[in-house]
Image: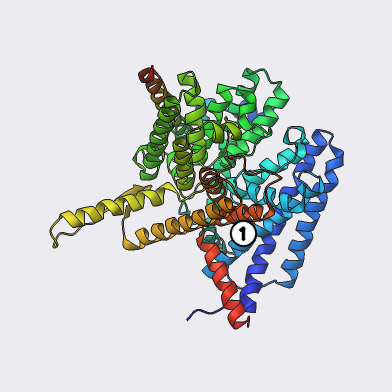
């Protein structure tokens, strides 16, 4: 029988949320250093207030809800669902105080978009934003989506391994790198830092090549490297990467985006010496194949309407947008208005599909994930085989994902449930957007961007959009980050609690 | 005297981190191949259309 959460369950959840609050306090404090470096002393109080609120709230929760009890899976799932609202709300404090956005709702939107690695933005006058606030926006994406703030919080501040293992599952990650979760977390942070350095070097070199001074090239490069690896898509310019008109910066972006879309387990295997894994892995094969096919379809479609005058332009506009969508990053080299008014509907639909399908499981990217797509495709092939072969024939299958994994009914069911849940939310978001008077293709595009934690925009997302639509997209970004299931679990517990009360 | 620098051996460093460094090159190498393939596709589409 289903039972609602008890007071003790809520205590365990609240106690673990307190640790996340502490880490958010640290994240909000770090931009103070940037503010000092760039003499932006006016911004320092905003970061200190945000950081202090996070620490104080964390301490209150810690002391009042202190418990020695271990988390169970249900606690971890609900904790993840709550934490992905709680942490962005705290992060929105300095954004709101600094008048970066028009209202607290917009600041919360920015916070959720940052932490979930989406990249849709409601920032006012982005091109004249102070560097410390800009750094915070990008750092939120790196900490939230790049290294995973919940896992890091519990791995560092948690008392036992079990809580952290469950936190991974609650956050829809299945990391089987090492038996020790602390070591696993260190590896995830280590991989993130290594690729952050490589990305920063690539972006900075590209920036200098394009004539930026070293300081600006480094600052922009660091920020874009953080959001590229986190497949977040925030940029320091309102025109995103289009601002630079640079093929070198776009190439640096493609490298960081695709690296971010690879599975952590794959990184670990390849960096540990199993280099052939990168060619054998089913998920990598499907991801790269999907990119090439989508790139072909979009390029051919754009060529058919003679939109771009050269092969280079086709690559830099068409293929770049495809890679950005497929990796769920959201770096953009086409203006939203051009995308929606000049691009053919077919290309918009392909981009929407790419955003919905997403990158690799257990990576920084969003969407349904290629591992699940692969599992569903393999099971489809098996079903066809079953229909063609005699009844007595046994059809079994497996796929290669770091190890050989048998294709069991449980694996197929898990993939199908997540895929169907995504499609339900996609339909819901599209309908809400259409009801606000936008066209179907614009609505599909923006909804898949929010749900897949992408950040490419058709122009719907702006400070002047209706409040209901802002809340809808915030919900979609949150649900998409949690891969939907945790959201349904939380809703289930809330309904049970309302019906039967909390004991 | 900077002891760390004097004791640093590039050969030892490369030997110790061989898997890690070649792993990074494998990943970036594959991505560069994908970039080249994507550009080739765009180029072919452009040529055929001409």
Q: Say which residue appears at 36% left-offset and 48% top-offset.
A: A374
Q: Quadrant of residue A330?
A: top right
Residue A138 spot, x, y in % from top left:
67, 41
**Residue A298: in sight, yes or no?**
yes
Secondary structure at badge 1 equals: helix
**Figure colour scheme:** rainbow
Q: Say which residue appears at 77% left-offset and 67% top-offset.
A: A60
Q: How many marks?
A: 1
Instruction: Determine whether A355 is above or below A412 in the image.
Output: above
Residue A267 spot, x, y in % from top left:
47, 42
Q: Where is mark 1, residue-wise?
A: A154
- The answer for which chain carries disc 1 is A
**Residue A23: in sight, yes or no?**
no
Q: Say which residue appears at 70% left-offset and 58% top-offset.
A: A21
Is A51 displayed left or right of A486 in the figure? right
Residue A184 spot, x, y in % from top left:
52, 51
């Amino acid at each position: 029988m289903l039972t609602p959460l008890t007071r003790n369950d809520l205590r365990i959840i609240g106690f673990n949320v307190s640790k996340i609050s502490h880490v958010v306090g640290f994240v909000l404090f770090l931009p103070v250093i940037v503010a000092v470096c760039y003499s932006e002393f006016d911004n320092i109080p905003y970061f200190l207030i945000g950081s202090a609120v996070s620490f104080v709230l964390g301490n209150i929760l810690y002391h009042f809800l202190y418990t020695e009890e271990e988390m169970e899976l249900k606690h971890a799932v609900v904790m993840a669902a709550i934490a992905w609202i709680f942490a962005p709300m705290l992060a929105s404090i300095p954004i709101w105080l600094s008048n970066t956005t028009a209202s607290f709702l917009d600041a919360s939107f920015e916070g959720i978009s940052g932490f979930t690695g989406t990249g849709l933005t409601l920032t006012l006058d982005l091109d004249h934003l102070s560097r410390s606030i800009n750094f915070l926006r990008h750092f939120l994406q790196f900490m939230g989506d790049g290294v995973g703030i919940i896992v890091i919080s519990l791995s560092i501040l948690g008392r036992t391994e079990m809580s952290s293992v469950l936190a991974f599952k609650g956050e829809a990650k299945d990391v089987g790198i090492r038996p020790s979760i602390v070591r696993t977390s260190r590896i995830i942070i280590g991989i993130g830092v290594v690729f952050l350095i490589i990305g920063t070097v690539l972006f900075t070199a590209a920036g200098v090549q394009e004539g930026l001074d070293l300081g600006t090239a480094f600052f922009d490069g660091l920020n874009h490297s953080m959001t590229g690896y986190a497949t977040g898509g925030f940029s320091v310019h309102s025109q995103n990467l289009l601002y630079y008109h640079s093929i070198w910066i776009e190439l640096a972006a493609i490298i960081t985006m695709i690296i971010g879309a690879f599975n952590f387990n794959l990184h670990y295997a390849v960096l540990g010496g199993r280099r052939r894994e990168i060619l054998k892995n089913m998920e990598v094969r499907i991801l790269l194949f999907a990119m090439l096919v989508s790139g072909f379809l979009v390029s051919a479609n754009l060529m058919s309407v003679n939109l771009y005058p050269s092969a280079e332009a086709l690559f830099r506009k068409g293929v770049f947008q495809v890679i950005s969508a497929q990796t769920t990053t959201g770096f953009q080299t086409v203006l939203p208005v051009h995308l929606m008014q000049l691009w053919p509907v077919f290309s918009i639909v392909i981009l929407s599909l790419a955003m919905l399908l997403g990158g690799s499981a257990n990576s920084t990217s969003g969407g349904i994930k290629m591992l699940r797509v692969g599992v569903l495709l393999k099971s489809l092939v098996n079903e066809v085989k079953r229909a063609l072969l005699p009844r007595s024939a046994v059809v079994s299958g497996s796929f290669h994902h770091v190890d050989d994994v048998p294709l069991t009914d449980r694996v197929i069911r898990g993939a199908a449930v997540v895929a169907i849940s995504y499609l339900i939310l996609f339909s819901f978001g599209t309908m809400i957007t259409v009801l606000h008077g936008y066209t179907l293709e614009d609505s599909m595009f923006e909804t898949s961007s929010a749900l897949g934690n992408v950040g490419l925009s058709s122009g719907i997302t702006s400070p002047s959009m209706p409040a209901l639509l802002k809340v809808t997209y915030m919900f979609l970004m949150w649900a998409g980050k949690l891969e939907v299931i945790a959201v349904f679990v939380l809703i289930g517990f809330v309904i049970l609690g309302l019906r039967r009360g909390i004991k | 005297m900077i002891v760390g620098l004097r004791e640093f051996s590039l050969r030892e460093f490369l030997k110790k981190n061989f898997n890690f460094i070649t792993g990074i090159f494998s990943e970036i190498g594959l991505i560069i191949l994908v970039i080249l393939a994507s550009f080739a596709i765009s180029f072919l589409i452009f040529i055929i259309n001409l």
